[in-house]
Amino acid sequence: MEWIPIGAWIGAAVVAVVVLGFCAYELSWKARRLRRDLAQLQELNGQLVDLQGGISAAQARLSAAGLR
């Protein structure tokens, strides 16, 4: 009968290792995804800055032409 508590502790330890392993996998996967998303957002931000510059240049040309 002494093996029952020992078996329960071993089972609990195995479950804890599995849960911690799954959590570590999820955290690493989410971190990779967030880094990829951040890179995409930074690229989009660069495109938006370029677009803003183009719009400002077009506004300046319109003002210089007296069309505004």
Image (cartoon, helix red, strand yellow):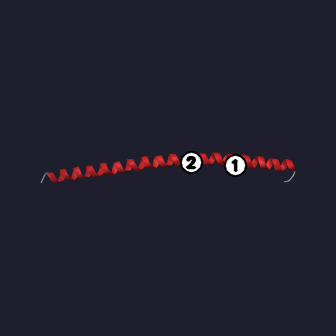
Q: Which one is nearer the viewer's eye here, 63 or 3?
A: 63
Q: Give residue 51's mark.
A: 1
The outermost residue toward the left is 1
The crowd level at tag 1 (other Cα within 10 Å; few <14, some 14-19, many 20+) is few
Q: Left or right of 43: which side holds 50?
A: right
Q: Position of residue 27 (x, y in %)?
A: 42, 48
* Residue type at tag 2: Gln
Q: Position of residue 8 (x, y in %)?
A: 21, 53
The outermost residue toward the right is 66
Residue at 41%, 50% (x, y): give it: 26
Q: Position of residue 64 (x, y in %)?
A: 85, 47
Mark positioned earlier in the residue sequence (2 or 1) = 2
Quadrant of the frame with the N terminus: bottom left
The crowd level at tag 2 (other Cα within 10 Å; few <14, some 14-19, many 20+) is few
* Residue type at tag 1: Leu
Q: Position of residue 56 (x, y in %)?
A: 76, 48
What element does badge 1 sit on? helix
State the residue position of label 2.
Answer: 40
Q: Left or right of 38: which side holds 22?
A: left
Quadrant of the frame with the C terminus: bottom right
Q: Left or right of 52: which side holds 60?
A: right
Residue at 59%, 46% (x, y): give it: 42
- Rounded to the nearest angstrom, the CA distance separating label 2 from label 1 is 16 Å
